[in-house]
Amino acid sequence: MKGRLPSVLCLRLFSNFPPLALLVCARLLLSRLRLPRPSPSPDLPPPPMAYWSQSTVRTRDLEALVAKGSLPPRTDAQEWIIPRKERRPAPPPNYVVSFVAFHDRGLGVPAGAFLRGTLERVKLELQHLNPNGVQQMAAFEALCEGYLQCEAHADLFAHLFSFSLRRDPESHPAAIGCAALKAKNDRGGLYLAGNLASSNKGWHTGWFYLRNDAAKPLPQYTGRTFESPPADWKWGASKTPIKELNAALDALEAVKARGVDLAEVIGAYLLRGVVPLRLRVLKLYQMTEERAPFVGTVTANPLPTVDEVRRRLRTITGNSSLEFPRQGVLPMLPDPRAVELVRSSSFRFCLSLSL
């Protein structure tokens, strides 16, 4: 009843003092109207590239990467630095710009030869990549080492993948994530089956300064953008004879026939606590029992559980029902079942290109 008094009062005022009543009633009634709120717009996947904005990284974010072995601990040498309030990077000398999402997807420092060689070959800086591109490179390196028994084969990678230029919605050059790595149009079926998450929302604000290794440096940060795709992006196999490439593809097909897909490769290296794109003492196929405990190769301590790896895989692939591991799938080297497979003649190409 009390809630109706203002309305009754308005009616009485209106009958005696029309002008004043109109103003008072309008204010009282409008203040009590419960207008429906506009429904929020659906969450749209963010563009794969963006302009710079203030970093949202906090110390706890990088300490979480340290705990997983994806980033070195911070010492007096300042292996990493949290940006202050700058809206675009201004790294100190001998630092590059990296992203939390990259280290979640297989990037480590000092960076290995495959990543450094690829960036040099196509004239890219680290910030030009996106999380899925980093993940694809990490998985490819693990595939070569863990299933094909060779170092990451640069020409095989160039035969299967290429970079394409991505722009912002207004077709302007983008500063972040502009180089999208994808399987070449006519060769997608030659590679591992599997998808990565279509959205890595918010990754481009997760940037920080990473000390560049003096002996094995990543490309220096310049903030360069691209108006058009450089000619270097239209790469292909340059040093490996086609006969060897075909042998590599035959070996890859044999691995796929044993159930190995993209998620299985990623899960296998996560279980071992290895960061593929990091410079390591041992290759995956060299991780035999007599070489344990793999100092300089395994960085995760403790090793993740199967459940933890499964959860990470579901995030990486965007598949909330993904099962891992699957029964009957070829295990990663140096498991004896994988050793038996690579003894076939198709795998002799593994005396491969060294970077």
Image: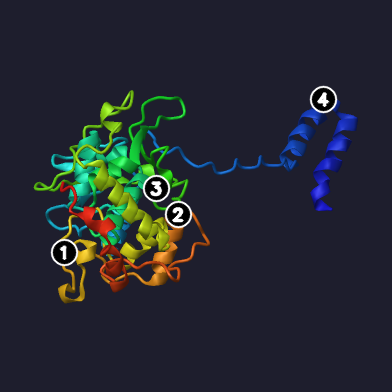
CA gap, disc 1 and disc 3 = 33 Å
Task: Name the N-terminal-most of marks 4 and 1.
Answer: 4
- Of callouts 1 and 3, the N-terminal one: 3
- Earlier sequence position, callout 2 versus callout 1: 1
Reading the chain from its start, which is encountered first: label 2 or label 3?
3
In this view, the residue farthest toward the right is 15
Q: Position of residue 17 (x, y in %)?
A: 85, 28
Residue denoted by label 2: 317
Return the mark for residue 271: none
Q: Are marks 1 and 3 in contact (CB under 8 Å)?
A: no
Name the residue: 34% across, 36% down.
163
Instruction: Determine the CA span between mark 2 and mark 4.
Output: 66 Å
Question: x, y (%) of residue 23?
Answer: 77, 29
Earlier along the polypeptide chain: callout 4 or callout 3? 4
169 relative to 103 in the view: left or right? right
Viewer-nearest residue: 77 or 147: 147
Kindly report the distance in space between the C-alpha atoms of the residues bearing marks 2 and 3. Answer: 19 Å
Name the amino acid type tagged 2: Thr
Q: Secondary structure at mark 1?
A: loop
Report, in whole angstroms, how far the alpha carbon at label 4 lies from the one at label 3. 80 Å
Labelled disc at residue 296: 1
- Name the amino acid, label 1: Gly
